[in-house]
Image (spheres, rainbow, N blue to C red):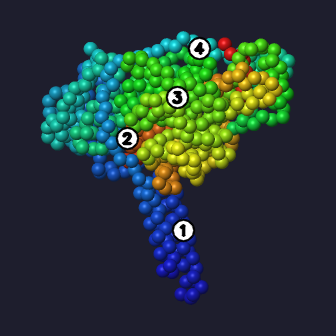
Amino acid sequence: MKQRYKEVLLALSLVLLSGCGQPVPNMGNDSSNINNADTISIDEERYNGSNGSNGLDGNSGMYNSSADGFQSLYFDFDSYSITPDMERVIAKDAAVAQKSGDRKIKIEGNCDEFGTDEYNYALGLKRAKAVKDMLAMQGVPSSRMVMVSYGESNPACTVQSDACYAQNRRVDLRLAR
Amino acid sequence: MNSKNHIEILRLKGSILRYLLLVMITINLFAVDATLTIEKDVEQRTRIALEEGSEVYHPSLFELFRSDLKVSGHFLTDANAYTGSYEGGVVDPAQKAQEYVLKYRFDESRGAKLSVRLLKAGDGKEVFRKSYAIPRSSKMPFLVHKAVSDLNDLLKYPSIAWINRYVIYAKYTTPKHSEIVLADYTFSYKKTIIRGGLNLFPVWADSKQRSFYYTSYRGLVPTLYRLNIYTGQKQKIASSEGMMVCSDVSRNGKKILVTMAPSGQPDIYEIDLGSGDKRRITHFNGIDVGGRYIDDENRIVFVSNRLGYPNIFKKGIGRSAVSQVVYHGRNNNACDAFNDKIIYASRESSSVFGHNTFNLYLTSTQSTQTRPLTTTGSNQFPRFSANGAVVLFIKQHAEGSSVGYINLQSKQSLLFPIDGEKIQSIDW
């Protein structure tokens, strides 16, 4: 009986003390002004970030937000793996790349909204890198390809549905301008 | 009483004690929530009434004063908004239950001018008087913040100077377009600093908030710039194929942590701004992002998927060993640090898609203890204040979005609505 009470008292003490276990940050004495000076405001010229066709591809019937004859590639949730059914699309994109002379190809990685800031941009980049590596294996020179991750900033679809989220987990290709 | 009954009673007592223990653990775990205000140490706070003496009553002023006083954790404010004469020492009998009366007067005939007087409620004796002015009346919230901050210092409470600081954030407008906006901590004042194009990840470059770093997507590859918000002077820092993000700035402002991918592989680098040298800190063939200086800035914490899911890790700069910091959750994809303290966001949705549930947790590099700070809704973008006392975060819930603040010392929390804005990144 005494042993049981000892155990209970020990457990209660731990619970009560656990609230004090995490040290609380000290308040500093950082000086501050009243932010009274005027701040600047910049209106950048419109960035030419074409979204391509943003519609259904005439040949395949699949949704395609790439441009210049390229087709977009779609990924699973939180994945940057190339699946066998993506290889056929990559082969077509490689053929389009070969026909476009020496022009640079922009490979854009995109994500759905289910991530947070930096991590989502890195995920988009890993998708772009996976596609770039596959295109390089098909003979497209690496020096002609440039990758940019747009994270979740460039949704092709904004409806809250699984089908819509799937359209946003993609890599778009276009000729660099 | 026979021995059988005695054993039954002991078993019953044991069950009751176990139940009480479970209840206490549950209460302790869920004690702090951003949606709740924990009325703790009420007797230790200063009771204060607010009385406006302007020619015209300004409801927004009362709300600003109330918010500032509340979030400080040092004041209990009378819920009534009194009006009366600014001058004189007459105290309304209804205010006698308070310790102090704060009289204020606002005039925006030439810019914005706020005058405040602090009177003792008992005898009407003036203990503080000051006027604050600012050229643009749109910046009026900063006058209130400064007045409350001074009042707080006058009564010798721990500093709440963080309420005077600018918040800077990027918000999405349309696909591939965003704006970078300056705000006060309540989002009552807002000014767009950069509009047009895609400009993301703003981070203050110095403690005085004169310049900030941001990523521009105007060229072929993402480029990091530093922009002075007063002069407009812009300096290119670095660019990288794939991604280029400034995650943290050293205390003296001479070094920054960035995530970039010169060979298509997102890793964390440290840039010495004096020499321009770039030092690669992480080497992993997956995702390493979000580096934050910890301890004496010889180590960092960061987000990595090296265990197959996003989680928080730490490593010494120039050292190879990486160690796991958080042993909780299966999707911890954002963090911030102040000295040895770490706050992180953990995704806790039951399904892959659908309703997002993110909660914030406080832990430390010195222990494995984790303290929940929120329990409901989607709580993201945690950022420590400059002195580590308060955590800023963005909360999304059924009613809309809000910017929230948790005072880690007083456990006071406050939410300000920011509906209609899709925030990409935030710093203060």
The answer to whether A165 is drawn above or below residue A9 in the figure is above
Q: CA distance from mark 2 to mark 4?
A: 38 Å
Q: Which mark is residue A38?
A: none
The residue under the point 70% across, 30% down is A129
First in sequence, mark 3 or 1: give its number.
Answer: 1
Q: Secondary structure at mark 3?
A: strand
Q: Residue furthest top?
A: A45
Q: Residues within 10 Å of mark 1 (few under 14, many from 20)?
A: some
Q: Secondary structure at mark 4?
A: loop
Q: CA distance from mark 1 to mark 4?
A: 64 Å
Q: Residue B177 lies in what quarter of the image? A: top right
Name the residue tied to disc 4: A47
In this orientation, does residue B161 appear?
A: yes
First in sequence, mark 1 or 2: give its number.
Answer: 1
Q: Which mark is residue B387?
A: 2
Q: Badges 2 and 4: C-beta atoms under 8 Å apart? A: no
Front-most of residues B328 and B25: B328
The residue under the point 16% across, 27% down is B87
Q: Amino acid at mark 4?
A: Tyr
Q: Which mark is residue B18?
A: 1
Name the residue tied to disc 3: B201
First in sequence, mark 3 or 2: give its number.
Answer: 3
